[in-house]
Amino acid sequence: MAVDLENPSNYLTTRVRQAVNWGRKYSLWPLPFGVACCAIEFMSTVSSYNDISRFGAELVRFSPRQSDLMIIAGTISYKQAPILKTIYAQMAEPRWVIAMGACASSGGFYNNYSTLQGADRVIPVDMYVAGCPPTPENLLYALTQIQERVEREGLVPAAVRHAGRVQV
Amino acid sequence: MSMSQKLVDRLRQEFGDAILAAGSYRGDETVTVGRDRLLDVLAHLRDAENCEQLSDIAGVDYPQRAGRFEINYLLRSVSKGHRLRVKVDAAEDEPVPTATGLWRSADWHEREVYDLLGVPFAGHPDLRRILCHHEFEGHALRKDYPIEQGQECSRPENLFSDEDIARAARRATAMSTTPSGHQDEVHPSDLLTVNIGPSHPAMHGALRAEMLLDGETILDARTEIGYIHRCFEKEAEDHTWAQVMPYTDRLNYCSAMLNNSIYAAAVEKLLGVEVTPRCQAIRVVVSELSRIIDHLVCVCANLVDIGALTNYWYLYNIRESLYESLEKLCGSRLTTNYARIGGLSHDLYPEFAAEVRSKLNDLVAATDDVMKLIARNRIFLDRTVGVGAISQADALSFGFTGPCLRATGLAWDLRKAAPYSGYEKYDFEIPTGTVGDTHDRIMVRMAEMVQSRSIVLQALEKMPDGPVNLDDRAITLPPKRNVYQSIEGVMNQFKLVYEGIQVPAGEAYGFGEGANGELGFFAVADGTGHPYRLKVRPPCFPIFSAYTFLIEGRMIPDAIAILGSLNIIAGELDR
């Protein structure tokens, strides 16, 4: 059914909150915290074949102050952990975090002296993506899941969503 | 008698009793020397026997021995083609003389041995930890260090002290002297410290460089690595030989097939077996496809870093389409886990050859497009020609191999110099550069893709028939129908999976031409199903150690262009 844009008697009602959240959902600016193999699959997700811009999230920002969705793509070591904490702290609210892949979610098959057993030990994570590394489709699915939450919950800050779970 | 054996004989004549022992195993020659004569022997090998490269230093921990640590110096002569391993023993806290005066690559290799095993090197100019963080206590690769004992790090390390900055300022003052004797005094507060990375797109997420700037010129720089140290070597000791295979995928994750094949070949060398002709040919095909993929990523990322985004789209799509074939072949795009010790996880699928041939035609179109965009592009040439040049002698001393060494004009390629997996059967050339700058490194990679394509087409054409796995029940898994239908088959499978392939005690260095250069695995077997020690020689580790040397005196934009052309893959660098 085509929408008749010219007919002056056609109108639409919605809540301001819904309209704003709907717009916000397609305006996530990702910050790739790409450290390992998963970062290569993040590159694939951004490139023209998979094209993350279909979901309005192509504006990759490397400055945490300009981004609202951190994608942790890769293994976080104990050496990297203070850096991750600092970068996360530099992001303005509201902010979301995707832990992409087994390492960022749980340490993966690196249960050893150097590997942090999941990024959620140091910062709050909203979405975990399975895979080693996850395919671009998996990452896009996680992105759409975050988008649904943005549409449903609006701009609830991470500090409220994760209250009492992880100390940053 | 091989060249390396003759070399050992000459060493015995020259040094007599100072050569404590000499041995030969699986084609590798080793000599053991005392710590007091180590430097004399190494210097003689470098100067009189043309061992231009110190490929790696591998320490092995034997807690029950009096001389607890055994340090292996892996030497290679590029001009003469021989190799030699020099061993020296050291008890705990007993210093070993540093080889930094002989080869520049010794700097980082010795730091690594110090970091992971705690062997001090007397006279080393900067003996600090390199992979573990600066607050780490103990030495992780010692046999008594528990693998799961993690240690938290509270803050990143400061790379420049006030004293370093003051020294750099004095140097800048001295450099500013004009012929008439006029001097501009540079005060330490005039210098600017700029930190790049590890969370910086041009630093690939895991490298860190701190640069001391005088105006826009980089006066001094220091790098820090280890941000994704994932303990490959400790994990290997904790797993069976076969279980190490998926870990090798994640070394250089842009070309996992190459890591798989070279690791499998290293263990096969220890076992003393040779895989079937079909397996060899398939390994060549997938390795060369991986090399193409790796070079595509390196070149496209390098071009993006210097602002040429269009090329990224052109090159990346080819890679995406090659990934489709790899995914069909082994179920995964990046982390392939395809080779097996003694064979492959399975044969090619029927349409593989036709698919790959057509995709390689697309590759030619894409590289042609990119060459049209960059070959005579003024901005590209200004950013790369003469930027980050390194001489052949320096490159050899720093341990450069692969495209970065070939860019200096030296046609050194292990596929030609020490053919393995049947590379001698294929007709291909070794592209070289002239001055070893960023431009040469990019162009060598572009030309190598053409050669790799030719090798793949030849290998597909000549693909032999037959099985891909060795029919040796001590190495490869039995056919599934035997496992399901006979008790012998079940036991065979059970023992191979749970206890691992029983590799006879001994040590050997298996190597091959990775996408970045010489990828080697120095493996020590103690007769069980687990590696006693598995040391990786990652090609980009010595290459990155030269980074500060390459960027000093240049500007930050050059530093970014140079880094991209070195193709540092953090997974392989930090292991």
Image: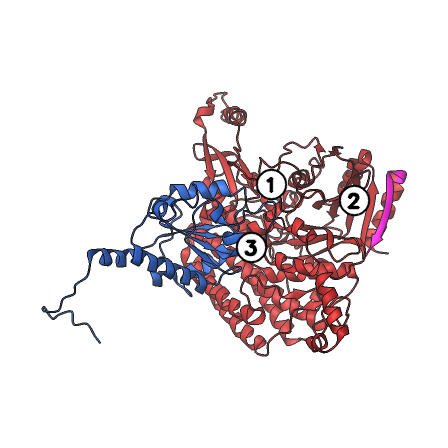
* x and y, in percent, of residue B294 in the image: 55, 59
Q: CA distance from mark 2 to mark 1?
A: 27 Å
- In the rendered image, the quadrant that contains the N terminus of chain B is bottom right
Which chain letter goes with mark 3?
A
Give the class, few, some or many, for how many residues have Cα within 10 Å of label 1's Cα (few <14, many ≥20). Answer: many
* x and y, in percent, of residue B107 in the image: 65, 38
Q: Which one is closest to the eye, mark 2 or mark 3? A: 3
Q: Which residue is mark 1?
A: B132
| Residue B419, quarter of the rendered image | bottom right
As drawn, B344 above or below B24: below
Specify the segment rendered in magenta: B16-25
| Residue A15, quarter of the rendered image | bottom left
Q: Amino acid at mark 2?
A: Val
Query: Can the viewer see residue B419 in this picture?
Result: no
| Residue B550, quarter of the rendered image | top right
Q: CA distance from mark 2 to mark 3?
A: 37 Å
Assign a secondary structure to mark 2.
strand
Specify the label residue B86 is tagged with.
2
Is A8 left, or right, of B449 in this rendering? left
Q: Amino acid at mark 3?
A: Gly
Chain in blue on the image: A
Which chain letter goes with mark 2?
B
Circles 3, 1 touching at the beta carbon (< 8 Å): no
* x and y, in percent, of residue B66 in the image: 82, 38
Magenta span main SS: strand
Q: CA distance from mark 3 to mark 1?
A: 19 Å
Give the class, few, some or many, for how many residues have Cα within 10 Å of label 3's Cα (few <14, many ≥20). Answer: some
Assign a secondary structure to mark 1.
loop
